[in-house]
Amino acid sequence: MPKAEATLGSAAPQTPPKAAACDSASLAPNPASKAMRITLLMQRPEGASLDEMVAETSWLPHTVRAALTGLRKKGHKIAKSKVDEVTRYTIAPASLS
């Protein structure tokens, strides 16, 4: 019995595997992601309304607004305009690089 106790106590702690190194290619947006879908909607000439982005992503309005804030923080230029009392959002295709 003492031998079994010794093997339990002497086991080395397991360390988690190291994460893969991040590069700019791995940080590129997934074309099928919901964030990319709202970006593509906003690239249209007429832009996109909040309701259109909610319908496309199945997100709640506050989640879509948070995604827009995230895009702004990443340096994307998002413009707002009112058309018939509806706010429309547009993003320039060049700002996605």
Image (tube, rainbow, N blue to C red):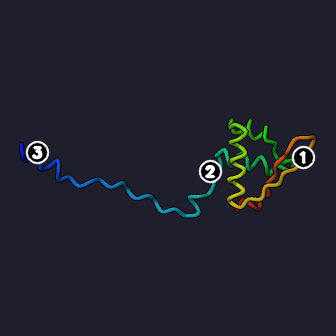
CA neighbours of label 1 inside 10 A, class few (<14), some (14 to 19), many (20+): few
Q: In terms of secondary structure, where does tag 2 sit? A: loop
Answer with the quarter of the image where residue 94 lies.
bottom right
Give the residue at x 72% y 59%. Answer: 96
Measure the alpha-carbon separation of dots 3 and 2: 51 Å
The amino acid marked with disc number 3 is Ala
Give the residue at mark 3. Answer: 4
Percent position of residue 55, x then y: 74, 35
Q: Is residue 93 above or below residue 55?
A: below
Q: In terms of secondary structure, where does tag 3 sit? A: helix
The quadrant of the rendering that contains the C terminus is bottom right
Give the residue at x 68% y 35%. Answer: 58
Q: In terms of secondary structure, where does tag 1 sit? A: strand
Who is closer to the viewer here, 21 or 69? 69
6 vs 53, left or right, is left
Give the residue at mark 2. Answer: 30
Measure the alpha-carbon separation of dots 2 and 1: 30 Å
Who is closer to the viewer here, 40 or 51? 51
Measure the alpha-carbon separation of dots 3 and 1: 74 Å
The amino acid marked with disc number 1 is Lys
CA neighbours of label 2 inside 10 A, class few (<14), some (14 to 19), many (20+): few
Percent position of residue 85, x then y: 91, 41
First in sequence, mark 2 or 1: give its number: 2
Percent position of residue 17, x then y: 37, 56
Give the residue at mark 1. Answer: 82
The amino acid marked with disc number 2 is Asn
First in sequence, mark 3 or 1: give its number: 3
40 vs 9, left or right, is right
Q: Is residue 48 above or below residue 79?
A: above
